[in-house]
Image (cartoon, coloured by chain):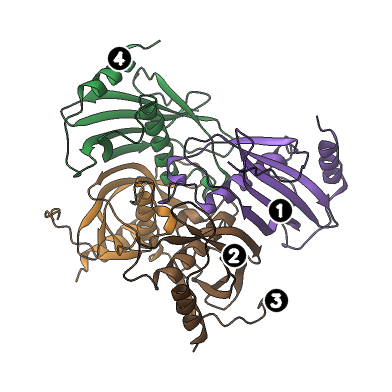
Chain colours: A orange, B purple, C brown, D green
Amino acid sequence: MKENRLPEINFRHRLPVQIRFNDIDMFGHINNSIYLQFLDMGKYAYFRQFMTDTFGSEPTAPVVANINCDFIEPTKIDEKLEVLTAITDIADSSMTLDQRVVNADGRVKCSARTIMVNVSLADGRPTTVSDPWRHRISDYESHKN
Amino acid sequence: MKENRLPEINFRHRLPVQIRFNDIDMFGHINNSIYLQFLDMGKYAYFRQFMTDTFGSEPTAPVVANINCDFIEPTKIDEKLEVLTAITDIADSSMTLDQRVVNADGRVKCSARTIMVNVSLADGRPTTVSDPWRHRISDYESHKN
Amino acid sequence: MKENRLPEINFRHRLPVQIRFNDIDMFGHINNSIYLQFLDMGKYAYFRQFMTDTFGSEPTAPVVANINCDFIEPTKIDEKLEVLTAITDIADSSMTLDQRVVNADGRVKCSARTIMVNVSLADGRPTTVSDPWRHRISDYESHKN
Amino acid sequence: MKENRLPEINFRHRLPVQIRFNDIDMFGHINNSIYLQFLDMGKYAYFRQFMTDTFGSEPTAPVVANINCDFIEPTKIDEKLEVLTAITDIADSSMTLDQRVVNADGRVKCSARTIMVNVSLADGRPTTVSDPWRHRISDYESHKN
């Protein structure tokens, strides 16, 4: 088996993802669209940890503007997967997430970079990422093990 | 090929359903859970036709309480499918839907009976099916071709 | 909150199921079709435990012939769910599975009875459940905690 | 409503896609992962048209190596969508697909560029796109209306 590790990113956020029987398509592998569900689960869990009290009452929400995803290696039904998520940049109204889906042997299944735009829930317009959110995220990302 | 027709129900409502690549599971057939998506699509289209002006503003909604589904014959990716829907009984606060998924040759893929309960959107409680809804549905079902 | 426990079945097989962001539909609850994915996951894990060495080489496979499912209570995204599975009857060529999806408080979300028919993978015909399978299953089900 | 048209690509291949009730997530829009199902449907239909006699017997298959997708505008349940697909480049063992999902008003919902690698089904290795396939595709793409 060839090496398939990618350049190191220090991922603090790791979420195990459970494979479902019907994630597997007629080729016997997890279908591409399912990896996006895994990336979504990683994003949701990442942001959810900062919203203990404010879930559902935030005035803005990050929405996905672009996903650039390399599909690197197929996955079979009995593999154990995790999705790794890091926010690697925060601009004025947007954020860059780097994510990987890896198996228990550390083999990378897919690697994705996502641009999320912070939009106002009132009018849908891009809105500056608030200082509390910047602090929560940069604090989280800077305290790596 | 053996005969697989079921007893006649006069289905007026017929919705073609489009198969997706990832509906097919590792056995090469449409996964069971996908048929429920087809049944949902039939239900939505059936009720939607009576809500030209009132969609989103009705005080009650029919919710699924029970589905009893026979899975009769597997389906492959290139088949052409339709979901047939009829409301065959309206009780005080519930309705019985009979539905079938059939292919272009009339072969029945699955046959389902669903009990839907009409609930208040305000408090979630079962609520009498209103007279306008009874009339729309019985009028629709009685004018069969 | 009203009591929603059903008659006791002694479920030995319990599988935690992970909710995905897109399991939730526009009503804010897990969509009906998703519960069937959970039931499928329970079935797969149940049978998989008896196939350490024979997975992919068995001459027969159990296929779903009927599912009768009560949808009892809606589920939100942050609940913790398990699917409970028991085989409660084995006839000549078919088996009865009872399954429930429950949350961490023991509230039942759905309760399903599934009839599976054991079919030959060579010709698709119903086939007697083999003695080794009968023994594995009845042994498993009789050793409850 | 702002203009959201992208630079012109002459898309010959257009496939209507049917929205399902459970494509809509808790925000009331089609979930991101569902657009990838639409892109998959476009790809499958595109390639399928050249395989009347050879479906299932080709020695190679194009597999997705990278998807770069802009999510431009949310979609609601009652919109009418099409996925447009064009192969815009064929290299030695890879192909570039440009795809868009548009609604009936021509508004672009997402725009994706996909790199597919032609792999041998025997050993999974990248393989030169065969001359018959090059001719079928370039012939198809050059006869635009």
Callouts 3 and 1 close, C-beta under 8 Å: no
In the rendered view, tell whether residue C19 sits above or below residue D55: below
Task: Name the residue type under label 3.
Answer: Lys
Classify residue D124 by image quadrant: top left
Q: Which residue is mark 2?
A: C114
Image x and y of residue C132, in percent: 44, 75
Question: Label 4 vs label 1: CA separation?
Answer: 49 Å
Pointers 2 and 3 within a single chain? yes
Give the secondary structure at mark 2: strand
Question: Label 1 vs label 2: CA separation?
Answer: 15 Å
Classify residue D51 by image quadrant: top left
Question: Label 4 vs label 2: CA separation?
Answer: 51 Å
In the rendered view, tell whether residue D76 sits above or below residue A133: above
In the rendered view, tell whether residue B21 sits above or below residue A104: above
Q: Which residue is mark 1?
A: B113
Give the secondary structure at mark 3: loop
Give the secondary structure at mark 4: helix
